[in-house]
Image: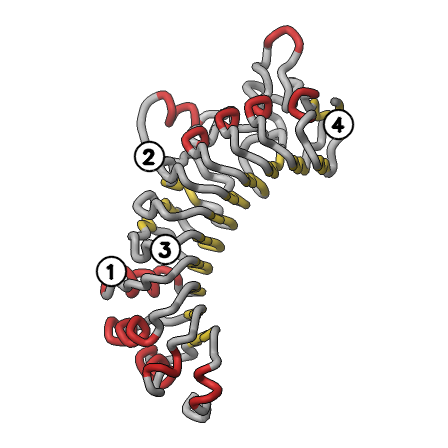
Amino acid sequence: MRNVDRATASGVRHLRLLCAGDTDALDIIADAIAFPSSAWRGITRLDLQSMHPSPRALQLLESALPALQELGVYRDLFTTFNSIFLLCPLKFPSLKSFTLQGGDKGANLRIPPFSAALERLCIAEVTGPLDICVESIPSLKSIEVRSIPELHVLNIARLTGLLSLTLHDLPELRHLQGSSFGFDELEALFYLKHLEKLSSLTSLERLAITGKRQTCCVPRSIAALTQLTHLEIDLRRTAGARFGPDAESAPLGLSGEPGGLYPPSPLVGCTALRELVIRDRGARLAVPQDALESLAALEVRQCAVHC
């Protein structure tokens, strides 16, 4: 790093720091910013990989990168996360995007409002039981959560300004609010497992619920999403199920069934819907005509469709 001249450093926009072996994170960070303070002030993106930064190391980063807009933490997620938010809470006033990816143990992940400008959050590839709370960051516009097989709770129900939500490969996700007892919890633990608090995200424009899931239900709560323009959803039927919406004998579709056994499709409430992507449906899928009228694009994969 010391071989980088000032002219080159002054043009750097993306800094990636990788800690290998027993190398001290403080040494790496101190080495990286061993230039006049103006050299790194143009950096807008920082990636930390396998880093265990000390409070002193984090203070160096905070003071050296006032224009930082994107922060990524990769591998050893929770050790680095605790360093950043518990040992030495950072303040990046311009930060707009935060990515946490890669962790081998779960935890209760409560992300504090460390940047008033934060708009995008991505959390991915974490093993072990996990609950996520981000309700203290009302500025968020986009959330992507993917490949977390034991995620149980995603606390986002109060983020009414959220515009985009992606939930991918989250087979155990039950709630979009804190854990509760009573009917809602029993409902989730049985077969409905609806993402019942989607209805509070009234500004949502893009929603994707894809990958491994334990249910084939279209969440009825999306009927309240009148601003939704793009919906991507994977529908599956649980093999061997005999009762409820997953039952193999029950004709399940996106539309209501004759005779009133199934209520009208929640898609009917999505009056702004323009793009609909449906995947991985082995059986016949019924799509309501009134939900199709406003669509500009319909993509159906591996489905036998009946409109």
- Amino acid type of disc 3? Ala
From mark 1 to mark 3, how far is it between C-alphas? Answer: 20 Å
- Amino acid type of disc 2? Ser
Q: Earlier in the sequence, mark 2 or mark 3?
A: 3
Which quadrant would residue 245 be assigned to in this image? top right
* Label 4 sits on residue: 305
x and y, in percent, of residue 123 in the image? 45, 53
Question: 10 Å neighbourhood of mark 3: few (<14), some, or many (≥20)?
Answer: some
From mark 1 to mark 2, how far is it between C-alphas? Answer: 24 Å
Front disc: 1 or 2: 1
- Amino acid type of disc 1? Leu
Residue 177's disc is: none
- Determine whether the residue tagged by mark 4 lies in a helix, strand or loop: strand
- Determine whether the residue tagged by mark 1 lies in a helix, strand or loop: helix
* Label 2 sits on residue: 179
Q: Earlier in the sequence, mark 2 or mark 4?
A: 2
Residue that appears at 38% across and 71% down: 51
Q: Earlier in the sequence, mark 1 or mark 2?
A: 1
- Amino acid type of disc 4? Val
Front disc: 4 or 3: 3
Colouring method of the image: secondary structure
Q: Is residue 248 visible?
A: no
